């Protein structure tokens, strides 16, 4: 899939009507790295281009900025106190606010591309009692910024404190640059596997009822829906960061993985497959695979990068045939 494509916005509006909503033409496939027989060219392109560009490099660049300029030094972090935790909370808060808020402003307030590439034909809910303040966006912002950023920050602070006290083993870049580069790359796979594991657990009926239902109120998702979750879900969701108690690493990779958990969902829940820039070309932002999960609930628990759903027969590729099969299974159950 090309990241950037030229588009005729006026022509596209004729296809993506508000009532119909947008549906990608191609059915979803497992990534080329899992194809058999292997296709080395496409697999390499997927790993080097599709997986890393531009968001992987963007998160890594941000992580380096945060580590060098916006994270307290080791001496400050030896003692666990709010004097250095609060600035970390603030910079995480501002980053999520800027990215999720920026996407929301562009796609839902300014509406510079209307409903073009929008998966759901409806706009976000207002005057709906299911949401705090009867407003979906305000509800999502509350849970994302107050609960989500706080629990993300507490995990980050706990691990930074452990790094400072050498309870987590630090590996410096000048000591093992290849190892750390591979670790940064593999963090995408770890994050995807951990997400599937936690997400599947959250669909256990008792846990779904007390926690995950809050996230699934967002059938029609927007950028602020990404980490709009119950605190119990946030605790489970961000627990993937605890991997650094087991795996030696540099603290910048903790920040990098944190961005994958906290910032990436703003893009994957944007509600749009693509953002149109200057009425001429597009950039991929949305995640149709996960969009289908919010629509049908009992499919696509993970992400294509770790296609566990394919193995366990919960994969929905977005086609009409897959929808018929899914509904047939529902009737039998």
Image (cartoon, rainbow, N blue to C red):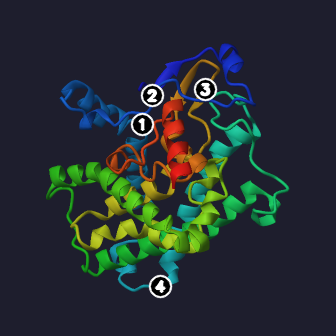
- Mark 2 and mark 1 lie on one chain; the one further toward the N terminus is 2
Q: Would residue 257 be found to the left or right of residue 165 on screen?
A: right
Q: Secondary structure at mark 1?
A: loop
Disc on res. 277: 3
Look at mark 1 in the image and give the residue it sits on: 54
- Residue extending farthest to the left is 175
From the top left corner, tell me how far across and down residue 220 is, in percent: 67, 47
Q: Is the residue under label 1 in contact with that under label 4 (CB below 8 Å)? A: no
Q: Which comes before the other along the chain, label 2 or label 4?
A: 2
Q: CA distance from mark 1 to mark 3?
A: 15 Å
Q: Is residue 192 visible?
A: yes
- Residue furthest right as drawn: 127
Q: Can you tell which of label 3 and label 2 is closer to the viewer?
A: 2
Spot occupied by residue 52 in the image (x, y as percentages of width and height):
35, 39
Kindly identify which residue carries mark 2. 3
Dot 1 or dot 3, earlier in sequence? 1
Point 54% across, 62% down: residue? 91
Residue 134, which numbered label? Answer: none
Pick whichever of labels 3 and 2 is earlier in the sequence.
2
Q: How far is disc 3 from disc 2 in space, using C-alphas?
A: 13 Å
């Amino acid at each position: 899939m090309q990241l950037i494509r030229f588009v005729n916005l006026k022509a596209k509006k004729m296809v993506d009507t508000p009532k119909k909503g947008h549906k990608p033409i191609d059915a979803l496939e497992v990534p080329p790295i899992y194809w058999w027989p292997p296709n080395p060219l496409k697999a390499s392109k997927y790993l080097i281009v599709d997986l890393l560009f531009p968001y992987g490099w963007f998160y890594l660049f941000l992580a380096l900025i945060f580590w060098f300029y916006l994270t307290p030094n080791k001496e400050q972090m030896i003692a666990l106190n709010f004097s250095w935790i609060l600035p970390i909370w603030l910079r995480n808060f501002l980053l999520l606010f800027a990215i999720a808020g920026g996407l929301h402003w562009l796609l839902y307030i300014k509406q510079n591309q209307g409903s073009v590439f929008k998966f759901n034909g409806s706009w976000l809910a207002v005057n709906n009692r299911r949401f705090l303040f009867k407003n979906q966006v305000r509800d999502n912002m509350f849970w994302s910024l107050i609960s989500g950023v706080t629990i993300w920050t507490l995990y980050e602070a706990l691990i930074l404190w452990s790094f400072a006290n050498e309870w987590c083993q630090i590996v410096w870049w000048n000591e093992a640059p290849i190892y750390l580069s591979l670790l940064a790359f593999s963090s995408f796979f770890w994050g995807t596997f951990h997400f599937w594991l936690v997400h599947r657990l959250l669909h256990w009926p008792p846990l779904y009822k007390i926690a995950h239902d809050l996230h699934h109120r967002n059938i029609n998702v927007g950028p602020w829906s990404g980490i709009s979750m119950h605190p119990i879900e946030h605790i489970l969701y961000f627990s993937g960061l605890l991997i650094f108690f087991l795996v030696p690493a540099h603290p910048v990779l903790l920040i990098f993985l944190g961005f994958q958990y906290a910032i990436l969902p703003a893009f994957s829940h944007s509600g749009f497959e693509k953002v149109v820039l200057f009425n001429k070309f597009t950039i991929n932002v949305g995640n149709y695979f996960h969009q289908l999960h919010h629509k049908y609930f009992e499919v696509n628990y993970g992400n294509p990068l770790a296609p566990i759903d394919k193995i366990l027969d919960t994969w929905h590729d977005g086609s009409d045939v897959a929808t018929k099969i899914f509904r047939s299974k529902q009737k039998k159950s």
